[in-house]
Amino acid sequence: MNLLDASAILLTLAAVFAYLNYRFIKLPTAIGIMLIGLFFSILLILLGDFIPVVSSAVDHFVEGIDFDTTLMDGMLSFLLFAGALHVNLNDLRDQKRLVAILASLGVVLSTFMVGGAFYYLFPLFGKEVPFIWCLVFGSIVSPTDPVAVLGILKKAKVPKSLETKITGESLFNDGVGVVVYLALVGLAVASGGDHGDAHGSHGDSGAMGIAKLFLWEAGGGILWGGVLGLAGYFLLRSIDNYQVEVLITLALVAGGYRAAGGMHISGPLAMVVAGLMIGNHGRLLAMSDTTRVHLDKFWELIDEILNAVLFLLIGLELFVLKLSGPAVTAGLVAIVIGLSARFLAVWLPVTLLKRKRNFSPGVIRVLTWGGIRGGISVALALGLPKDSDFRELFLVMTYVVVIFSIAVQGLTLGPLVRKLILSDPTIKPEESH
């Protein structure tokens, strides 16, 4: 199936499911589309037992969509830029310490806690997984997904400062998480594939390799994002034509992301930095009121359409999974382990920073529950080497974590905020920390 046919089918399904959700179910659009897609997948799988041709056709269609490439090399750049475009840089600056710690040390800490726990838990499910591959799984489920988070926060009505914490962290830790994942997969493969000794002689060289990769990918991505943002700013400032200015931002994202891939630096971080610069300095100093309105409407529409397609794909990915009892059970355990690791990764920096600033009483629990995993985790699991003995296991576990995270955490985040923070009479929503 060619790209145009696949795009036509996905857009049609997304539109139909969005209509059904809006008309009858009335959940947040992205979550509603994902759950309808999941139900649709289950229904078709059941029908496949009686009408094999239906199951075969759907399997062929879903397997023909490279989720990893579609998200990581295509949709993600537009989604991250659109998300960063509406983040106030002054608000983000006020939360910079916590955001920086959660987006860097928090991801690494969670990776090692999840990986370390499953190194001892996998044998209970009949799997012997080397430690380095356990860390790879930890890196898959540790980053919070900016796509999932941004879509859900719009409906949750959280206080502005709390929204900035969650949004800022999710935008930046995506890039950091991908770098950690790539480094660990490289070490895992170099250690002898699936069967290598995870505790081999990769100590200093491995750590040095990870440090160099991190500095090059993350640092290079941030610098490249600054260059793109600055170039976009001067181009937008030199003209006053909203059609051309919208086209410039579109080219900045598409071309800038591809160029980042060619330089082997972090395209996600570049898009976040460029989006912050265009959305703040560019919006204030380089755009007319007419351009601001059209630019916001354009990127809001891009964001909504791609979100709908992405969450539809998450629901349909059920077709490519080889479900088994032990893998699903391990996924359910991973939910608990992942939330526990997230709690510790949040508790530590908040506790340390409490010496210099005040936080609202429920902020640790809200940040823990607001650490939502989404399509990026699925894409990373699908990006594992095809010949890996652990690919199917990790993919099923990741899928279970993601479905729970989006459906349960996403739907209950708003009520949790209202219960823990907004119900506190001593705290005004706009003052919540």
Image (spheres, helix red, strand yellow):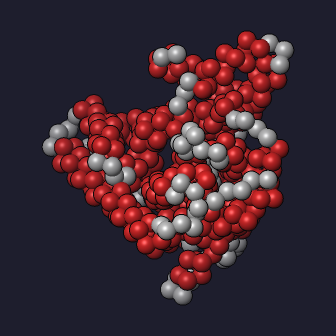
Which sits in the foreground, 243 or 112? 112
Residue 16 vertical placement versus 382 (above, below): above
Which sits in the foreground, 270 or 274? 270
Which sits in the foreground, 51 or 90? 51
Which sits in the foreground, 425 or 108? 108
- Residue at position x 56%, y 31% in the image: 309
For residue 349, which quarter of the picture? bottom right
Residue 210 vertical placement versus 85 (above, below): below
Judge left or right: residue 30 versus residue 420: left
Asked whether residue 427 appears in the rendered view, the answer is no
Residue 414 in picture, x, y percent from top left: 68, 55
- Residue at position x 61%, y 53% in the image: 195
For the image, the number of numbered tags is 0
Judge left or right: residue 56 versus residue 100: right
For residue 258, which quarter of the picture? top left
Judge left or right: residue 189 versus residue 123: left
Asked whether residue 113 appears in the rendered view, the answer is yes
Residue 337 vertical placement versus 182 (above, below): below
Residue 140 in picture, x, y percent from top left: 58, 53
- Residue at position x 52%, y 31% in the image: 66
Q: Quadrant of the C terminus?
A: bottom right
For residue 27, which quarter of the picture? top right
- Residue at position x 55%, y 83% in the image: 352
Residue 180 in picture, x, y percent from top left: 48, 59
Residue 331 in picture, x, y percent from top left: 74, 51
Residue 268 vertical placement versus 130 (above, below): above
Farthest residue in the bottom direction?
355
